[in-house]
Amino acid sequence: MNRNALIEILQQEGNLKHCFSHDEIERLAEHLSIETVQAETVLMKKGEPSCSMVFILDGLVQVIDGDRQLAIEKPGSIVGESLFSDEATRTADTRTIEQTTVGRFSVHDFEDLLNKNQPLALKFREYFRTITRARQQQKAAENYTDTRKYLALIAHNNMKESLMEFCGMHSRKLEKFPLMATGTTGSMLYKKTGLVLSKKVASGPLGGDQAVGTLISTRNIIGVIFFRDPLSPHPHHADIEALGRLCDVYQVPFATNPQSGEAILDYLLSGKSERESIPNHVLQTYIQGQTKVVEAG
């Protein structure tokens, strides 16, 4: 790839074109060295000094942290902009998926640009720092762990009124928990009882039951009160069954009517739920089996 092709890619691909003129991008390109590398080549290694960044000009690049893929970068993308951050070392590996051409910009290239055109160099530095901050915020959000323990309130349409009556009777107890429900149930709950949700999910047929199931698997649900309509068919019956199965797997109290709902509230408020429960031997056996499969692989 020649210099003119490099300039054209930088001017047309990626986000540089939104913040810099064609002439400014051309000035930057003068300080990039062009490299073409084969597939499975490590461009940047975790733990090494953050002394350069690359612009993907052609091919695909994979960013990996351990056994987790963080991103796949395409032409126009920038990798390694931490060159301008406070991070002294790389926080992930960067390697090519296929033959790839990159434009590399090192700390020495930046110093050279700084000597020749200080205002432009500082403008690029601030731009790359902004990208770094945005990615750090994204990474923090991805790594955020919600430690709250929700009480899920669910009801089929024909049972929502019963759920409202139940919540009205037990509002003093319910307000002690972070509550989780669909938006519709949450609106009705606030209007009729003054209780507010801590987390909202979609309606059951649109994935709400599965969303609750996900939080059960991450140990974020301490109880499920699900007033089911036993006399009507439901299009998401499989999701309902799966939700009950997950409650059994993780030993989460599951109530389906007002009486069992009241029993769950009293149980949760008694503090007994925080004690060590009877071990789930089936789950332990399953986890041990999965561990053996991984080790054998």
Image (cartoon, rainbow, N blue to C red):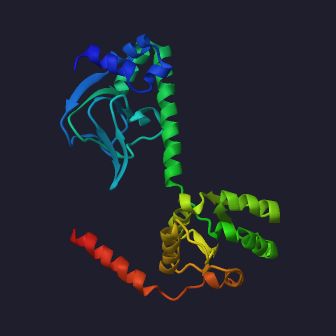
Left-right relation of 240 to 296: right
Q: Determine which quarter of the picture holds residue 229.
A: bottom right
Q: Residue furthest left?
A: 38
What is the number of callouts on the image?
Answer: 0
- Quarter of the image with the N terminus is top left
Question: Residue placed at 50% from the left, 21% from the top?
Answer: 19
Left-right relation of 279 to 225: left
Question: Which is more toward the observer, 181 or 84?
Answer: 181
Decide: is 260 above or below 210. below
Left-right relation of 175 to 268: right
Decide: is 264 above or below 232. below
Question: Residue placed at 56% from the left, 78% from the top?
Answer: 252
Q: Position of residue 238 (x, y in %)?
A: 48, 70
Q: Position of residue 142 (x, y in %)?
A: 49, 51
Question: Residue placed at 42% from the left, 14% from the top?
Answer: 115
Q: Is residue 14 visible?
A: yes
Q: Is residue 176 visible?
A: no
